[in-house]
Image (spheres, rainbow, N blue to C red):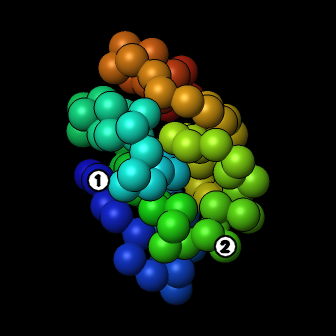
Amino acid sequence: MIKILDNEENFEEEVDKDLVLLYFYADWCGACQTMQKVIENVTQCDVLKINVDDFHMVAKEYEVMSIPTMYLLKKGEAVARKVGALSKTELLDWISSYQK
């Protein structure tokens, strides 16, 4: 399921799951627009989209310096990070490698 972070108060609840992909993006970012089509194919885990312009404190907490940036979280703990656009295959393979 893909969700868009709409307030910081429910952030902890959204990420406290088996496997969650945090997707940091901005509407004006060309690479993020390309990644949007790839993100739509993710079915192995929940996806939480975080607009860095709206939630700069969350982006700061995760040390997001470039977008798109993606984190995989298990039970709320970051286990992996990718920066930059990925192909559909790269993204799905990366997520699959953390499903166990």
Give the vertical position of 12 relative to 88 (above or below).
below
Please identify the residue farthest to the bottom as the structure is shown. 9
Numbered badge on residue 41: none
Q: CA distance from mark 1 to mark 2?
A: 21 Å
Name the amino acid type tagged 1. Answer: Ile
The image shows residue 93 at horizontal and vertical percentages of: 45, 17
Query: Which secondary structure lies at badge 1?
Result: strand
The image shows residue 95 at horizontal and vertical percentages of: 48, 28
Displayed quadrant of residue 48: bottom left
Q: Judge whether residue 43 can be spotted in this image.
A: no
Mark 1: give few (<14), some (14-19) or many (20+) Cα within 10 Å.
some
Give the vertical position of 47 relative to 70 (above or below).
below
**Nearest to N terminus: mark 1 or mark 2:** 1
Q: Which residue is mark 2?
A: 57
Q: Nearer the viewer, residue 71 or 67?
A: 67
Q: Mark 1 against mark 2, which lies toward the viewer?
A: 2
Q: Nearer the viewer, residue 55 or 75?
A: 55
Mark 2: give few (<14), some (14-19) or many (20+) Cα within 10 Å.
few
User: Given contact means CB atoms under 8 Å apart, are the residues at marks 1 and 2 in contact?
Assistant: no
The image shows residue 29 at horizontal and vertical percentages of: 43, 45
